[in-house]
Amino acid sequence: MNDSILNKKIIFTEDVFVWLKSTMPHLPTAYVASIPDISEYGQKEDLELYRQWFVMTAKAILSKMPDNGVTLFFQSDIKFQGQWVDKAFLCQLAAHELSTNDLQNNVQPISLMAHKIFCRYPPDTKHFGRPAYSHLLIFSRQKITSPPISSPDVFSSVGHKSWERGMGHYVCEFIWSFLTRVYPVQEVIQLFCGEGALLAYINHFTPELSLIGVEKSPKRSDKARRLYFNPKPQMGPQGRHHYFLLRE
């Protein structure tokens, strides 16, 4: 296990399942996860096994959520062998299966608080390949009937990303706003954190917040330790702005 601390940001290079088994949050905590795609799953040609693994993974994450916590999934659907794989449905299936057991044990069930859509391409764009939008689903055991601020249900862009599978800065902005203004927490744990754009964003605006990232890939976890958010973006190749940069 290898730690790196920048303010209160800690990155673990470790398997997510091993890390989850060894920890139990006590603070008001937010779990954030983007469960890996089938291309990163061991059985790349078996869609049914992948669906089962996805639901099992989502349940493992949701089951760690404390009563005063919240869990967010940021997921992009895929088209695989002529089938549409709806990952938002799989996340809700995991929550439903856990909630059924909770009700039987007189435990407050998990509820879906919000479901946001972030466009990966401009609306009305025609293209082949992956669906043109991503889901952000928010689950909790507590209900907020009157949120202090409102927000769109559909966002026109994910924003700039540090890498192709990363979380765009508009997504990071919404999550940071939600976790500091709507559902304040003291700790954010991002599983499968990749290059850690969300942690870099939160660390820039609220460095006092405890941040933990877990990523199995040494290459990605090293970048997560060094990545930081630049509110005055630099102009990169092809005229693109870069909000996320790496420290040497």
Image (cartoon, grey):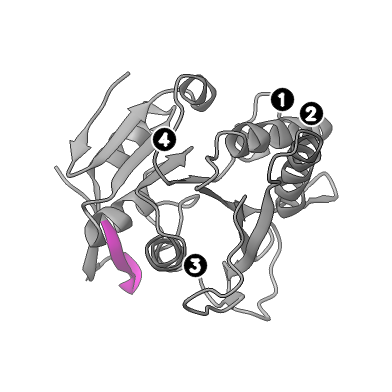
Residue denoted by label 1: 43
Mark 2 to mark 3 CA distance (whole Å): 29 Å
Tag of residue 26: 4
Q: Residue at x 78, y 45 (%)?
A: 96
Q: Residue at x 61, y 71 (%)?
A: 145
As drawn, 128 above or below 52:
below
Mark 1 or 2, closer to the camera: 2
Left or right position of 148 against 120: left
Cβ atoms under marks 1 and 2 closer than 8 Å: yes
Q: Is residue 193 visible?
A: no
Quadrant location of the N terminus in the rendered image: top left
Q: Which residues are magenta?
A: 237-244
Q: Residue at x 58, y 71 (%)?
A: 121
Mark 4 or 3, closer to the camera: 4
> Which of the pair 140/229 is nearer the observer?
140
Residue denoted by label 2: 49
Q: Is residue 215 visible?
A: yes
Mark 1 to mark 3 CA distance (whole Å): 29 Å
Crowd around label 2: few <14 · some 14–19 · many ≥20 (10 Å): some
**Residue 49 magenta-highlighted:** no
The image shows residue 69 at horizontal and vertical percentages of 50, 47
Cβ atoms under marks 2 and 3 closer than 8 Å: no
Mark 4 to mark 2 CA distance (whole Å): 33 Å
Mark positioned earlier in the residue sequence (1 or 3) = 1
Residue denoted by label 3: 158
Left or right position of 95 against 219: right
Which corner quadrant of the image does residue 226 belong to?
Answer: top left
